[in-house]
Image: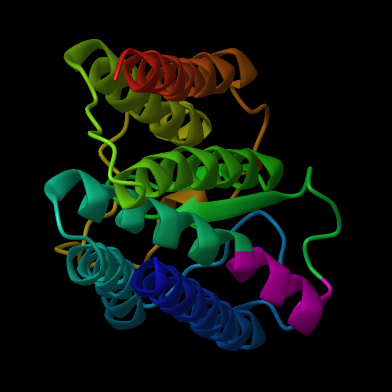
């Protein structure tokens, strides 16, 4: 159990530090492009900087996967540590932005969350809510593994979890997709034009709450079924 406390403590420290590093990059970007305060419509970013930003985001995911691989012993435990680290990182990213920039003004403030495969936009509360669920679910898995219990996620739970995640991601990309639908202006790292060039007048309209909540409830149901089945298995043992 001592090794577990040491491992999870260092995962938390790493994730918080990574959250600060992420927020520091955004502080620099906003100083360069939004010196009068971040707001929509988004300003264009030169293609060389845009490509760096694209691969920086990709590198972030690889770093978080690496944490899971190093911290966990089984595939499931590694996945759980990855999810746990991701959630801690993302939550503290917003904590440090608030400390450094006094932003966001509220949890309802719109933000651009990610660029891959399309820009994700949504209110800050949405990724934060997902992070809380991710922390809860991953800790449930890690805790049961550390207790020596046999931990198993069946196909229906995986389906609910994965489909819910895809639905939530789709909800984040929905407003952007509707804005540029019918055009061929999607930006990719192979593009020769500036990032957000197609968004010169884009103002987020309405977050797709029904779609997001459908995905969130699907993921929550997956976690709930895992807990109930794990408790049933423990009683039978």
Q: Residue at x 44, y 23 (%)?
A: 227
Q: Foreground residue, 184 or 235?
A: 235
Q: Residue at x 45, y 29 (%)?
A: 168
Name the spot of residue 167 as percent of width and height, x first. 39, 22
Is 212 situated left or right of 55 in this image?
right
In the rendered image, the vertical position of residue 90 relative to residue 144, given as above or below: below
Is residue 196 visible to us here? no
Q: Residue at x 43, y 55 (%)?
A: 84
In the rendered image, the vertical position of residue 192 relative to residue 174, given as above or below: below
Quarter of the image holding residue 71? Answer: bottom left
Is 231 situated left or right of 67 in this image?
right
In this picture, which residue range is highlighted in magenta? 92-102
Number of callouts: 0
Name the spot of residue 237 as percent of width and height, x first. 29, 20
Is residue 51 visible to us here? yes
Name the spot of residue 22 as percent of width and height, x first. 50, 77
Name the spot of residue 24 as percent of width and height, x first. 57, 86
Q: Foreground residue, 73 or 119?
A: 73
Q: Quadrant of the N terminus?
A: bottom left
Quarter of the image holding residue 46? Answer: bottom left
Question: Can residue 100 be found in the magenta stretch?
Answer: yes
């Amino acid at each position: 159990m001592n090794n577990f406390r040491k491992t999870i403590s260092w995962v938390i420290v790493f994730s918080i530090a990574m959250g600060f590093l992420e927020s520091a990059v955004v502080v620099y970007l906003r100083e360069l492009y939004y010196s009068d305060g971040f707001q929509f419509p988004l300003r264009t970013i030169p293609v060389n900087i845009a490509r760096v930003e694209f691969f920086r985001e990709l590198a972030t995911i690889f770093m978080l996967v690496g944490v899971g691989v190093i911290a966990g012993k089984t595939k499931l435990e590694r996945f759980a540590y990855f999810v746990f680290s991701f959630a801690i990182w993302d939550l503290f990213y917003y904590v440090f932005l608030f400390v450094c920039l006094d932003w966001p003004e509220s949890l309802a403030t719109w933000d651009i969350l990610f660029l891959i495969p399309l820009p994700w936009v949504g209110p800050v509360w949405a990724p934060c809510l997902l992070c809380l669920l991710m922390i809860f679910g991953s800790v449930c898995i890690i805790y049961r593994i550390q207790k020596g219990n046999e931990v198993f996620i069946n196909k229906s739970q995986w389906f609910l979890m994965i489909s819910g995640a895809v639905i939530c991601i789709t909800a984040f990309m929905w407003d952007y997709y509707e804005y540029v639908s019918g055009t061929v202006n999607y930006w990719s790292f192979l593009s020769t034009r500036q990032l957000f060039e197609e968004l010169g007048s884009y103002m987020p309209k309405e977050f797709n709450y029904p779609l997001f909540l459908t995905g969130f409830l699907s993921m929550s149901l997956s976690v709930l079924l895992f807990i109930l089945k794990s408790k049933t298995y423990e009683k039978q043992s």
